[in-house]
Amino acid sequence: MKIMKFGGTSVGSAERMGAVSQLIPAQEPVLVVLSAMSGTTNHLVQIGQQLAQANVAQALVLTDQLEQRYKQVVAELYKQDDSKEKGHQVLQTVFADIRACLHKPFSAAIEKIILAQGELLSTQLFQIFQEEKGVTSVLLPALEFMKITDEDEPDQAYIRENLQKQLAKYPDHHLFITQGYICRNHRNEIDNLKRGGSDYSASLMGAAVRAQEIQIWTDIDGMHNNDPRVVKNTYPIAELSFDEAAELAYFGAKILHPSSILPAQQHNIPVRLLNTMQPQAAGTIISSKRTGKEIKAVAAKDGIYAIKIKSSRMLLAYGFLRSVFEVFERFKTPIDMITTSEVAVSLTIDNATYLPEITEALQRFGTVEIDSELTIVCVVGDFMEDKPGAALKVVQSLSQIPLRMISYGGSKNNISLLVNTIHKEKALISINEGVFSERGKSHE
C-alpha cells in the first residue's frame, strides 16, 4: 500500500481537487490523506479567537463567510445534482457542528473540535467527487484510529492496531480516504497533531501499515537546496538521507513537518516529496541511502533566543551541565544549540513560553544574559570526519557576517551557525554563492 498525502494548496479549490483525483492510481492499494483546503484552518482559528473573546456575533459572521466559500466549492466541484445535494448535506452537518460550538462555553476542547472541521470537510467532499467519477472509495474516519497519549505523543501501537482493523473491514477495496492532522487524545476528546501535522499523520499511518512508500504532495517540486523565497536559482535535491531530511525540516525547511521523518525511518519506508502542480517532476526521495555528497542544503530557523550562563564556579565542576539541562527539562523547553567554555555555557531555544521562569532558575548558577531576534542557519550534508574542508567552505562563505555561535561535530549531518536575524538573508545568499554556485549552474 502507498500513502499519498495532499496538502492544503493541493486541495485548495474545486479545480485542484480534480487534479489530485487524476494522480491517484486506479488499481493500486492507496490510502489518501488530506489536509483542509488552503485558508480553512486559518479561518477556523479566527473563529476560535473570536469565541475566546466572547465575541459570538463576529464568530458567527466568520462561520457564515466560510460556509459561503464552501457552497461555491460544491457548485464548482460537482456536475450531477445528486452529488451537489450530498455536498450540501455535508456542509449542513459540519457547519451546524461549528455553530453548536459557538453557543457553548469556550475551552481548549471546543477550539479543537472547531479546528477539526476543515479536514472533515475536505475528505467528505473529495469522496463524493470520487463517487461521481465512478471510483469506489472508502472514507476512513481518522478519529477512529489516530490517537495521542497524555504526553501529546502518538500512540503508535493503538494507531497500528486500529487502522489495520479499519482496513480489514474492506478487503476488496483499493482506495481509502482519511483526514490528516486530527486525532483523539487520551481522554478520547478530539485533538490534533498541531499545525503541519498532516505530514505527521501520513508518516504514522505509513508506519502502521508498513507502507511501500509515503508520498507528500505539496506545491513545491521537492526539498530545495536553499530557501527559494530568498535565494535565486535554487534547485530540488534528488536524494536525502532520513537524518539529513530531519535536520532540514527541524531547522526551517517548510515543505516537511519536522516530526514526520521518524516513523518512516523506524521502518525504513521511503518518503517522496512531490509537486501537484508539476506531477512529472522527480521531486525528492528520502531514504536510508547515503549519497556521500558533502553539502546538500541549507535552512534557517527564526525566533531564536540565546542564553548565556557565566560562572567562575563552573570551572571543572562536574554535574554543572546536568543541572542546567534539568532546568530546561523541568519547563519542557528543547535546546537547539550549545557551546561551552571554562567559565560559560551558551545555548539556544526557540520557545520562550517559560523564559522568565528558566532565567530565574538559571540565576542561581551565575550571571544570565538573554539575546533575541536571532536565527539558526543550518547547513546539512555528509560531514564525515574523513572529509576535510567541508566545514571550512561553509565558514569562509560567511566571512562578512558576524557569527554568534557555531555548532559542529554533534551530528555527521549538520553545521549550525547562529546569526542576528537581520543578517539571515545575506547569510543564505552568501552560502549559496560560496557552496552551491557551481552545482546551481548545472541545474539551470
Image (tube, rainbow, N blue to C red):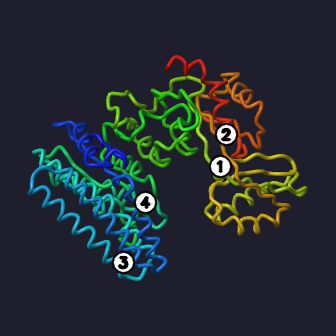
Amino acid type indicated by mark 4: Asn
Q: Earlier in the sequence, mark 2 or mark 3?
A: 3
Question: Is the Cβ of the residue at disc 2 closer than 8 Å to that at disc 1?
Answer: yes
Q: Earlier in the sequence, mark 1 or mark 4?
A: 4
Tell me which corner region of the image, top left, top right, bottom left or bottom right, holds residue 101: bottom left
Q: Earlier in the sequence, mark 1 or mark 3?
A: 3
Q: Residues within 10 Å of mark 2 (few under 14, many from 20)?
A: many
Question: Is the Cβ of the residue at disc 3 closer than 8 Å to that at disc 4?
Answer: no
Question: What's the CA distance linking mark 2 and mark 1?
Answer: 9 Å
**Mark 1 highlights which residue?**
336
Image coordinates of residue 319 in percent, x first then y, are 78, 57
Residue 355 position (above or below residue 242): below
Label 3: state its secondary structure.
helix
Label 1: state its secondary structure.
loop
Image coordinates of residue 17 in percent, x first then y, are 26, 46
Identity of the residue drawn at 40% across and 67% down: 185
Check residue 296 in the rendering and tell me which mark sits there, or answer none: none
Question: Is the Cβ of the residue at disc 1 closer than 8 Å to that at disc 3?
Answer: no
Amino acid type indicated by mark 3: Leu
Amino acid type indicated by mark 1: Asp
Identity of the residue drawn at 47% across and 63% down: 152
Question: What's the CA distance linking mark 1 and mark 4?
Answer: 28 Å
Check residue 102 in the rendering and tell me which mark sits there, or answer none: 3
Amino acid type indicated by mark 2: Ser
Identity of the residue drawn at 41% across and 33% down: 221
**Residue 260 relative to residue 85: left or right:** right
Label 4: state its secondary structure.
helix
Residue 60 position (above or below residue 315): below
**Mark 2 highlights which residue?**
416
**Mark 4 highlights which residue?**
42
